């Protein structure tokens, strides 16, 4: 007969009453005193506890009416009554341990309010129930019901894929946040940089350091600390206005560790390759008389980098490219004028100043375009000549706008503008400048709000 058949219909067992047993109705008897007490207690234990009943005019306590409160020692005694050894220590070991209970409580306390504790999963393999003939039926059920549960599992367990997604999102946010840092380091590596420019990059680096620690990017935290220490050496009292050779090398070495941690956020080579060809082309196209074929000759001669153009003299340009001397002189003059007016040729280190310059250029461009449209309505010789000059002036201004956009990092916008009508170009640049100015104002107000919040908290 199976264990569940016994639960449903217990078989009578003939037993002799214990010497101290009392007749029916003469009080309660101990479970171990009767042979069928095992089955009766098991049946009552499996059923829900009945309401408190009157016995001999006295209400029976609810704790005695519920078989779930049956002492462990009594269940162990039942095992002895059936002739099988069932020590009390074995039965007690089947109860839920305090450490397990505390583990569930701690997990529930750590879980967010909107999450809930998941019950332990079902065993992956069937539970083997031993033969009741070899031990107490209660102990067998205890083995099933009171076995040690596995550690609690929480909804939203943080997996390796979640960590990778978090780091990817963090780098996506860090790319625009590190624009000023990349600008300064590009000038440090390929141009001339002033130590005061490095100070402008420190707030962005420190804010990134605060964000990196909560997401668990410890290597980045360490690299940022080392780079900040290198900056402190360059910016210390008594240091020259421009980083010396050893200080420059130390900064580049510390920056290399940042590029290893977040390649896209601290990339310099790819950013230079995107910016420099556009800046060089816009500069050379502004030179009067420098035709596209001449520009191609200059690029083939190795004059496609700002560093090479800065170092080239007019006679050297004419000699290596074969262009007329007058055009070479005009080219060298335009390059040196740009170098004097724009110390940071690849990237801006003062966003606010560059935005003001770009806004001024946009006003000039808008006026030139309106004058060109007015001249295009006439057909006289003077109007045709005026139209040609206005077209040239408008194009030079637009090329200068392109340079400023690239220095700001708006490379995609600068490339897209070439395919738009001129009026649309002005609208796109005007929209970008407005958004950049608003973002700069919000960024400037953020520290003030932070300090105000700190003062209110104190």
Image (cartoon, helix red, strand yellow):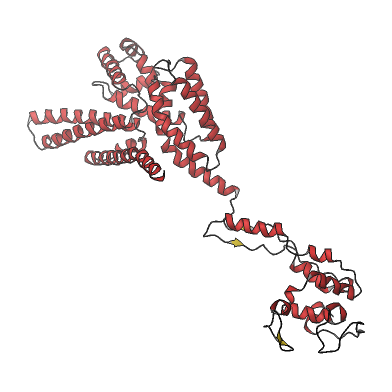
Image quarter where the N terminus lies is bottom right
User: Who is closer to the viewer here, 269 or 157?
Assistant: 157
Image quarter where the C terminus lies is top left
User: Who is closer to the viewer here, 311 or 131?
Assistant: 131
State the count of labels. 0
Q: Is residue 304 visible?
A: no
Q: Is residue 435 visible?
A: yes
Residue 285: image x %, image y %? 28, 25
Q: Is residue 406 above or below residue 344?
A: below
* Residue 386 placement: quadrant: top left
Q: Image point 80% across, 82% down: which residue? A: 40
In the picture provided, is 85 more to the left or to the right than 429?
Answer: right
Residue 15: image x %, image y %? 91, 84
Q: Image point 35% across, 19% down: which residue? A: 298
Q: Is residue 330 above or below residue 427?
A: above
User: Who is closer to the viewer here, 399 or 295?
Assistant: 399
Residue 125: image x %, image y %? 75, 63
Q: Is residue 24 above or below residue 380?
A: below
User: Who is closer to the viewer here, 450 or 117?
Assistant: 450
Q: Image point 33% across, 32% down: which residue? A: 351
In the picture provided, is 11 more to the left or to the right than 256?
Answer: right
Residue 452: image x %, image y %? 36, 42
């Amino acid at each position: 007969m199976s264990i569940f058949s016994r639960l449903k219909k217990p078989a009578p067992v003939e037993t002799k009453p214990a010497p101290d047993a009392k007749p029916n109705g003469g009080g309660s008897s101990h479970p171990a005193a009767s042979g069928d007490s095992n089955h009766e207690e098991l049946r009552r234990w499996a059923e829900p506890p009945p309401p408190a009943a009157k016995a001999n005019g006295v209400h029976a306590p609810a704790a005695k009416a519920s078989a779930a409160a049956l002492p462990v020692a009594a269940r162990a005694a039942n095992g002895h009554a059936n002739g099988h050894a069932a020590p009390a220590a074995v039965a007690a070991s089947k109860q839920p341990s305090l450490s397990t209970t505390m583990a569930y409580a701690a997990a529930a306390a750590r879980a967010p309010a909107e999450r809930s504790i998941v019950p332990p999963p079902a065993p992956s393999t069937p539970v083997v129930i031993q033969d009741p003939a070899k031990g107490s039926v209660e102990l067998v059920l205890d083995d099933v019901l009171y076995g040690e549960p596995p550690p609690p599992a929480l909804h939203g367990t943080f997996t390796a894929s979640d960590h990778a997604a978090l780091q990817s999102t963090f780098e996506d946010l860090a790319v625009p946040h590190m624009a000023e840092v990349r600008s300064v380091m590009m000038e440090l590596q390929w141009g001339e940089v002033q130590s005061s420019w490095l100070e402008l990059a420190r707030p962005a680096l420190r804010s990134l350091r605060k964000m990196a620690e909560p997401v668990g990017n410890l290597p980045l935290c360490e690299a940022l600390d080392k780079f900040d220490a290198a900056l402190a050496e360059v910016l210390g009292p008594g240091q020259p206005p421009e980083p010396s050779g050893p200080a420059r090398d130390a900064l580049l070495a510390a920056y290399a560790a940042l590029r290893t941690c977040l390649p896209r956020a601290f990339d310099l080579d790819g950013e230079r390759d995107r910016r420099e060809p556009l800046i060089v082309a816009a500069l050379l196209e502004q030179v009067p008389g420098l035709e596209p074929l001449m520009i191609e000759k200059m690029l083939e001669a190795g004059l496609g980098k700002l560093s090479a153009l800065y170092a080239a003299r007019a006679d050297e340009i004419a000699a290596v490219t074969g262009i007329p001397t007058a055009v070479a002189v005009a080219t060298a003059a335009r390059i040196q004028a740009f170098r004097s007016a724009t110390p940071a040729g690849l990237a801006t280190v003062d966003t606010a100043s560059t935005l003001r310059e770009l806004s001024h250029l946009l006003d000039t461009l808008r006026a030139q375009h309106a004058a060109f449209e007015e001249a295009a309505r006439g057909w006289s010789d003077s109007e045709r000549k005026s139209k040609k000059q206005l077209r040239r002036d408008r194009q030079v201004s637009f090329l200068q706008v392109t340079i400023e956009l690239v220095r700001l990092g708006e490379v995609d916008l600068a490339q897209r503008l070439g395919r738009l009508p001129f009026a649309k170009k002005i609208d796109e640049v005007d929209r970008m400048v407005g958004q950049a100015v608003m973002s700069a104002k919000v960024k400037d107000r953020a520290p003030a709000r932070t300090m105000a919040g700190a003062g209110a908290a104190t």
